[in-house]
Image (cartoon, coloured by chain):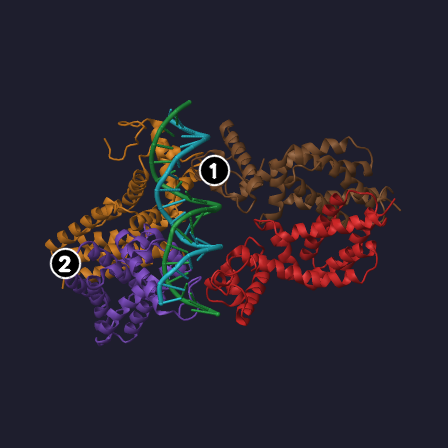
Chain colours: A orange, B purple, C brown, D red, E cyan, F green
Amino acid sequence: MPANAAPRGPQKGRTFTESARRAQIVAAAIAVIAEHGYAATSFTRIAKQAGLSSTGMISYHFANKDDLIGEVLTEATRVAYEFIFPRMAAATGHRAKLRARLESNMELVRAHPGHVRALMEIARNAPTTPDFVDERFGLFTGHLRAGQDAGKFGPFNADAMAVAIIGAIDAMVIGLVFHPEVDAAEFGRELADTFDRATRPS
Amino acid sequence: MPANAAPRGPQKGRTFTESARRAQIVAAAIAVIAEHGYAATSFTRIAKQAGLSSTGMISYHFANKDDLIGEVLTEATRVAYEFIFPRMAAATGHRAKLRARLESNMELVRAHPGHVRALMEIARNAPTTPDFVDERFGLFTGHLRAGQDAGKFGPFNADAMAVAIIGAIDAMVIGLVFHPEVDAAEFGRELADTFDRATRPS
Amino acid sequence: MPANAAPRGPQKGRTFTESARRAQIVAAAIAVIAEHGYAATSFTRIAKQAGLSSTGMISYHFANKDDLIGEVLTEATRVAYEFIFPRMAAATGHRAKLRARLESNMELVRAHPGHVRALMEIARNAPTTPDFVDERFGLFTGHLRAGQDAGKFGPFNADAMAVAIIGAIDAMVIGLVFHPEVDAAEFGRELADTFDRATRPS
Amino acid sequence: MPANAAPRGPQKGRTFTESARRAQIVAAAIAVIAEHGYAATSFTRIAKQAGLSSTGMISYHFANKDDLIGEVLTEATRVAYEFIFPRMAAATGHRAKLRARLESNMELVRAHPGHVRALMEIARNAPTTPDFVDERFGLFTGHLRAGQDAGKFGPFNADAMAVAIIGAIDAMVIGLVFHPEVDAAEFGRELADTFDRATRPS
DNA sequence: CATGAATGAGCGTTCATTCAT
DNA sequence: AATGAATGAACGCTCATTCAT
């Protein structure tokens, strides 16, 4: 049983309509968060965006606000993963993969601005730190340490470097979101260059 | 002198008690923001933290919530500035100053955790982006370009680098705040090393 | 259909219970305004009068205070119109119609004291002057000018006369409301006589 | 001892400064009421208008809000009386005096708009009906009955006529206040003509 | 499966008034 | 004679959540 099950909705399997409704609500939530920010996102606004007549509908399909936000996070993360993963997979070697990670992340901002904005908003404002934050940290430290073991990266503290990279990614993502005129690909390359130099073996 | 004055309190000069009360409320607000986050910070909570009997008290001393938050920002910024500035001033050269900036910022987290956390919370969640965000960006790009002109930094895009540095600083600050067991000085040095390599002339 | 809809209640059509609740709240509001005056009318008092547990209930059914007051105005105006209109329609000629208007208005005070008092209170105290105030002025000046053109009224300034008539009506209405012992029909006739003489052609 | 004495201020006689302060506050209150309306008139606004640093000052000199409003009423009534009385006194006969009363009242609107506006605002919005309302009613019925006894007025119901006249006056005053472009003298003559015809003996 | 209705705590803010100094 | 500080109730309004139907 998933942790985020609706209390009165179907407990185990979801029917087709049930899933469709949830998806519809999640999409509306992403749109609202992207447009108005996390703080200004209420069930009322989401219901309006989704064309629902009452907020009761949302509470019926999601156990509570955290449940809905979790689902939004899952969906947005999925979209991001599906964009970034193949680009990383196509690159060879630890250094190239890191570069692919950073560059594709910046391209993602232009490809799916709503999902990215929602992801950022939730990561920064949600009361409980979502799991994907730690997950992402683990992925980066793993990659960095593996590269160090392979002699491709220098002898830096991998935890500190992971934090720096993640922070830089997020800050640049936000910058790009709020400045649509900036060349995302160029800034992506700059970011990749920056950490390419920073992680280079001496 | 701030433009925002208390609605019924003394308009021009502040009496001793007035200033003391304001300081007390600002301190309480910092504590609440640091502990519960910006979104969960209400006049009710601040009043309770400050030992005041009602929220009317706060409204008496501050024109509105923005006024109070502005004062919190001023105070927290002041503390941060007074900590970081002398350490930067003591360093010589563009590279050393950048290093001093990064290292002292991490030390600041341990010296004034509440102020730092409050600063982060407000910067990320406040409805109106506070001035110091843009200010900080301008300071970094200025420093980086000056260093480039002096031949001390490489030919990177200064805007992109500034975003990366600021993002890395903030992410690490938050990481340190939530992980008191981490050696802030060490992480500060790692961060400084990271951007020392990243900005090195080729 | 009114432009102002409840924020979370049904947007387009109203269900039966919805309409019933709105009517109940409007009735309670009329009662409160009539008894305590516009300035002392709060959601809290209206909720108490209506037997509702909280003011949130009112906000659920009405977008805001203006929306509720607007509905009260609509209802009270409707009652007044339905009382006065047939009596005017039954009269023949400009002079007789004016008399019917004045007399029936005074009878209305005894038939629907609450609605009349509420109407007066809102007209005088509401932040935004309701449309019906200007509307009434227009109706009177129109009637007076038409009568002058037909040679039934004298050559007075129709605007000034309309103001005088409306002011006299309202003052007498209030007087009757606060003095239930007064014979409304007699005062209505006196008022009609007064303006019959005042508007007579020389 | 006057009914409206300050609780801690001088009980019997007023010192010079005391009286000056009261007058200053009353003047400020008139200005505020005239500009913002009764409902939007608070001690805070009055204090600001008067250049006082706190509302405590007002509470010190006046027992409560009613006390202050009463004083405002007294002052505004005095001004109105001093304007209207000599003009009535200069007229001879009941009919001429009535005409002088109505015409001078309209001229008063242009001569002392602030005082008139304050008077109207208080009369309509104050929680307790001020004495001067009944007083004015008494003056009118007295004059009308005296004129009837002298055979100068017709056999109308004096109470009803007084109500009509007072209502017409107030409505026209308000109209003039909100429409500065209207010729007050002309409308005053029209109003006088209206009630001259209405009160004429048959 | 879905809904409309209701709930009640909480929000920031304003207010007239009190009172020690 | 005056003041700055404090009070606490009340305001309109929003919110996530509940629940009978």
Residue denoted by label 1 = C47
In the displayed structure, D112 sits above or below C66; it is below
Q: Quadrant of the C terminus of chain B?
A: bottom left
Q: Is residue D171 visible?
A: no
Mark 2 Cα shell of 10 Å, populated few (<14), some (14-19), many (≥20)? some
Report x, y in % for residue C155.
85, 49
The quadrant holding residue B61 is bottom left
Q: Secondary structure at mark 1?
A: helix
Disc ID at residue A157: 2
Q: Is residue B72 visible?
A: yes
Closest to the observer: D40 or A126?
A: D40
Q: Mark 1 belongs to which amino acid?
A: Ala
Q: Measure how far apart labels 2 and 1 are at the Cα level.
A: 63 Å
Report x, y in % for residue C114.
60, 36
Callout 1: chain: C
Closest to the observer: C113 or B167?
A: C113
Callout 2: chain: A
The quadrant holding residue D2 is bottom right
Report x, y in % for residue B167.
28, 59
- Residue drawn at x 25%, y 59% as measured from the top left: B114
- Residue drawn at x 62%, y 50% as measured from the top left: D124
In the displayed structure, A191 sits above or below A52; it is below
Closest to the observer: B134 or A147?
A: B134
Q: Secondary structure at mark 2?
A: loop
Q: Mark 2 belongs to which amino acid?
A: Asn
Report x, y in % for residue C200.
85, 44
In screen coordinates, is A61 left or right of D9? left
Q: Are marks 2 and 1 in contact (CB under 8 Å)?
A: no
Of tags 2 and 1, the one toward the viewer is 1
- Residue drawn at x 49%, y 34% as measured from the top left: C50
Q: Quadrant of the N terminus of chain B?
A: bottom left
Disc ID at residue D194: none
